Image (cartoon, helix red, strand yellow):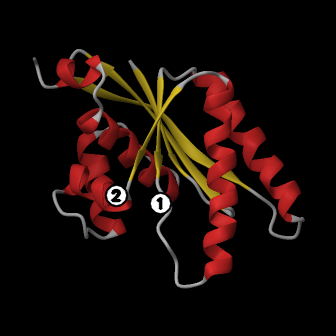
């Protein structure tokens, strides 16, 4: 089973691919999709769409897990993040891939054990759980954490396989 984790952002969208082989988590790849801040919002959304589409067509995930948007103090920033998140969700939907969504607190709790963990704690645990992972950025590490969270909370057969049920 192959899981794609996505951490949406307008400037940087992190992605991470994990395979589950029996009860072993295997890091397949991770990285980030960026958009040019100098371009119009619509052009930036196309850049995000194209980048995520390339990841999906290259790695062909079975399921996708996406981090939910948290409400920011700045409504304009929250709205822009919502646009990016919508585009990120559209790509796997166009390929008819199952999508699951997880709150940032749930992701942190599943990886670190507490919902209020720091980014550094998440990065450390991702490296512990996926020793071959050399995530190129905090966004890629966060995306891998979203994929790990999906494995823990998913209602698919992958969860029963991981838990030995």
Which class describes the residues within 10 Å of circle 2: few (<14), some (14-19), or many (20+)? Answer: many
Task: Please provide percent x and percent y for residue 26.
Answer: 34, 27
Q: How many marks?
A: 2
Q: Residue at x 58, y 23 (%)?
A: 59
Label 2: element kind: helix
Q: Is residue 63 above or below residue 157?
A: below
Question: Which tag, 2 or 1, sits closer to the chain's start?
Answer: 2
Label 1: element kind: helix
> What is the quadrant of residue 50 in the picture?
top right
Decide if residue 3 is on the left or right side of residue 94: left
Q: Is residue 81 above or below residue 140?
A: below
Task: Please provide percent x and percent y for residue 16.
Answer: 48, 40
Task: Please provide percent x and percent y for residue 162.
Answer: 19, 24
> What is the quadrant of residue 89 in the picture?
top right
Q: Residue at x 24, y 37 (%)?
A: 152
Task: Please provide percent x and percent y for residue 23.
Answer: 19, 21
Q: Residue furthest left?
A: 165
What residue is shown with label 2?
A: 123
Q: Residue at x 30, y 39 (%)?
A: 130
Tell me the quadrant of the picture where the C terminus can be found: top left
Alpha carbon distance from label 2 to label 1: 7 Å
Marks 1 and 2: in contact by CB < 8 Å?
A: yes
Q: Residue at x 80, y 69 (%)?
A: 37
Tell me the quadrant of the picture where the N terminus can be found: top left
- Judging depth in this view, the residue of 36 and 67 nearest the camera is 67
Q: Is residue 164 above or below residue 135?
A: above
Which class describes the residues within 10 Å of circle 1: few (<14), some (14-19), or many (20+)? Answer: some
Q: Is residue 2 above or below residue 116?
A: above
What residue is shown with label 1?
A: 138
């Amino acid at each position: 089973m192959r899981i794609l984790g996505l951490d949406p952002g307008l400037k940087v969208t992190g992605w991470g691919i994990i395979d589950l082989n029996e009860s072993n988590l295997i890091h397949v790849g991770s990285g980030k999709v960026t958009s040019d801040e100098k371009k119009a919002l619509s052009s930036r959304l196309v850049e995000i769409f194209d980048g995520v589409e390339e990841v999906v067509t290259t790695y062909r995930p079975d399921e996708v897990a996406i981090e939910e948007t948290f409400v920011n103090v700045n409504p304009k920033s929250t709205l822009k993040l919502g646009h990016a998140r919508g585009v990120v969700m559209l790509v796997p939907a166009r390929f008819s891939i199952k999508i699951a969504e997880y709150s940032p607190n749930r992701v942190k709790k599943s990886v670190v054990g507490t919902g209020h963990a720091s980014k550094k704690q998440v990065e450390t645990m991702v490296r512990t759980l996926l020793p071959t992972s050399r995530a190129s950025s905090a966004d890629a590490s966060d995306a891998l954490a979203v994929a790990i969270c999906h494995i823990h909370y998913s209602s698919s057969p992958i969860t029963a396989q991981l838990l030995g049920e």
